Image (tube, rainbow, N blue to C red):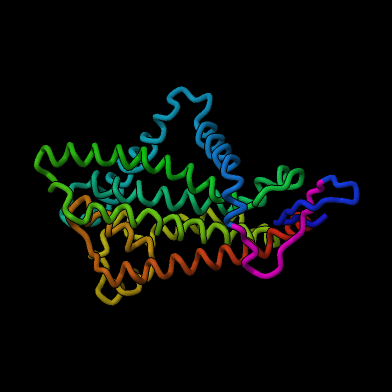
Amino acid sequence: MSDANAARRVPDAQGEWTTVITPRAGWFGLDLAELWRYRDLVVLFVRRDFVSQYKQTVLGPAWFVIQPLLLTVVYAVIFGGVAGLSTDGLPRLPFYLCGVVVWRYFAECLTRTSNTFVANTAIFGKVWFPRLAVPVSVTISALFSFLLQFGFLLAFLGWYAWRGELPLPGPAAPLTLFLVPVMACLGVGLGLVVCSLTVRYRDLRFLVSFGVQLFMYATPIIYPLSALLERWRGIAALNPMAVVVEAFRVAWLGSGTFDWNMLAVAVGISVAVLFCGLALFGRVEKTFMDTV
């Protein structure tokens, strides 16, 4: 039986109510009101994802902080120390940690969303609920991880500011509240595109992690945007994550390459990618159970 994405209740001749599940027509067969009615399920998924990540580990939630910190140290040693890449005159650890924390949220949204259909085939085949609830729960649970890591980043930057090695956050700091949704839109949008294509082309599953890693090197995580030649900066600025990372550094480190035109382009691209992802997801979810 084909998977469906709409449900309604109708009375039969005896006056009893029966739930009828039918697919919606069109590319955007998404009902946000219906998703809201299943908000308790979204909360349940968020709790499951958040709690199960480091369940039965010795250090538990401390890994939320340890992982980005270890990665930051590795980057500082290899790219800052051995390769000697510029950090725009900023201390290495804050420079890399800022990029790592921002990138991990985007990467988690993308990689976990891209596995939506394949990872949840068993439950999708047994019970009906809005399939979009899974990507939404992934985004929210990843946001909790990001907030923990961002809190650690602020404490880390505060220590450097107290030592006089970094300036205090400037008036651009509130921009962070706007940058997080941009990251979520881009990460979830790309994840929805990949998960929709993965239903038919399973090979894409093995390319996701490689693609994310390659995309990271195309984003100024281990180097500042100013380190690129002038002719390449305009091309790099078409990468929304490059703009987001630089904006974070401007807001919290007081150094980076950023202007509002770049941000407007980044927002436009991120929203367009999200709509493309939703369109593909809405199209594929109607019949994916016949394919997987």
Quadrant location of the N terminus in the rendered image: bottom right
Residue sticking out furthest to the bottom? 231
Instruction: Tell which of 245 and 32 is nearer to you.
Output: 32
Q: For residue 24, which quarter of the picture?
A: bottom right
In the figure, is residue 112 to the left or right of 164?
A: right
At 27% from the left and 56% from the top, the residue drawn is 175
**Position of residue 109 measured from the top left corner of the image (x, y, whole percent):** 49, 51
In this view, the residue in front, 16 or 21, is: 16
Residue 292 seen from this side: no
- Kindly give the residue lying farthest to the right in the view shown: 13
In the rendered image, residue 211, in percent from the top left (x then y), is placed at 50, 59
Q: Position of residue 281 (x, y in %)?
A: 62, 61
Of residue 61 and residue 130, the one placed in the foreground of this image is 130
Q: Which residues are magenta?
A: 17-31
Name the side, left or right, on which 35 lies relative to 233. right
Quadrant assignment for the C terminus: bottom right
Residue 94 versus residue 195 in the image, above or below: above
Residue 31 is left or right of residue 54, and the answer is right
User: Residue 223's quadrant in the figure?
Assistant: bottom left
277 to the left or right of 171:
right
Residue at image coords 18%, 57%: 255
Q: Nearer the viewer, residue 258 or 213?
A: 258
How many labels were placed on the picture? 0
Q: Is residue 130 magenta?
A: no
Where does the image place residue 229, in percent across and percent down from the top left?
A: 26, 72
Looking at the image, residue 71 lies above or below residue 260: above
**Which SS does the magenta portion mostly show?**
loop
Q: Residue at x 35, y 48 (%)?
A: 100
Is residue 24 within the magenta segment?
A: yes
Whether residue 11 is visible: yes
Residue reaching furthest to the left:
164
